[in-house]
Image (tube, rainbow, N blue to C red):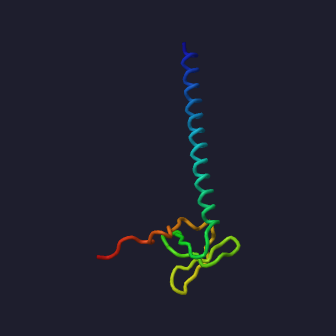
Amino acid sequence: MNTAAQGGSGMFFFLIIAAMFIFILFSGRGQKKREEQRMAKVNALQKGDGVILPGGVVGTVAGFKDNALEVKIAENVKITVLKSGIVGFVNSNEPAAKGGSN
């Protein structure tokens, strides 16, 4: 009777490992798809488009270099940022910051 119990627990262990493998496989595919969409948006940027940099810095694209963008973050202040460093995009139809001080 012990062999039947051992065989059942081995099958259960195998099913748990298979479920974890499938979960990891599909979660990685979703992340890869989101990254490809983000990079497509980065590659489609034009001068004057708003971008969000790490740390919440908001600026506008002022120029392009090999694998980088020149971003204007203030009057007479431009920084060079790698394309992979762009974390978000500012919708040109809406202001970057909503609301204000009352």
- Name the foreground residue: 58 vs 43: 43
**In the displayed structure image, the side of residue 99 where residue 91 appears, left or right:** right
The total number of labels drawn is 0
- Name the foreground residue: 45 vs 54: 45
- Name the foreground residue: 51 vs 17: 51
Which picture quadrant has residue 102?
bottom left
Looking at the image, the residue that sits furthest to the bottom is 76
Residue at 59% of width from left, 38% of height from top?
22
Looking at the image, the residue that sits furthest to the top is 1
- Residue 29, percent from left and from top: 61, 47
- Residue 20, percent from left and from top: 56, 38
Residue at 60% of width from left, 79% of height from top?
62
- Residue 60, percent from left and from top: 55, 76
Looking at the image, the residue that sits furthest to the right is 66
Quarter of the figure with the N terminus: top right
In the rendered image of this protein, does residue 2 appear above or below residue 94?
Answer: above
Residue at 71% of width from left, 73% of height from top?
66
Residue at 60% of width from left, 63% of height from top?
41
- Residue 77, percent from left and from top: 55, 84
**In the displayed structure image, the side of residue 96 where residue 34 appears, left or right:** right
Looking at the image, the residue that sits furthest to the left is 102
In the rendered image of this protein, does residue 6 appear above or below residue 97?
Answer: above
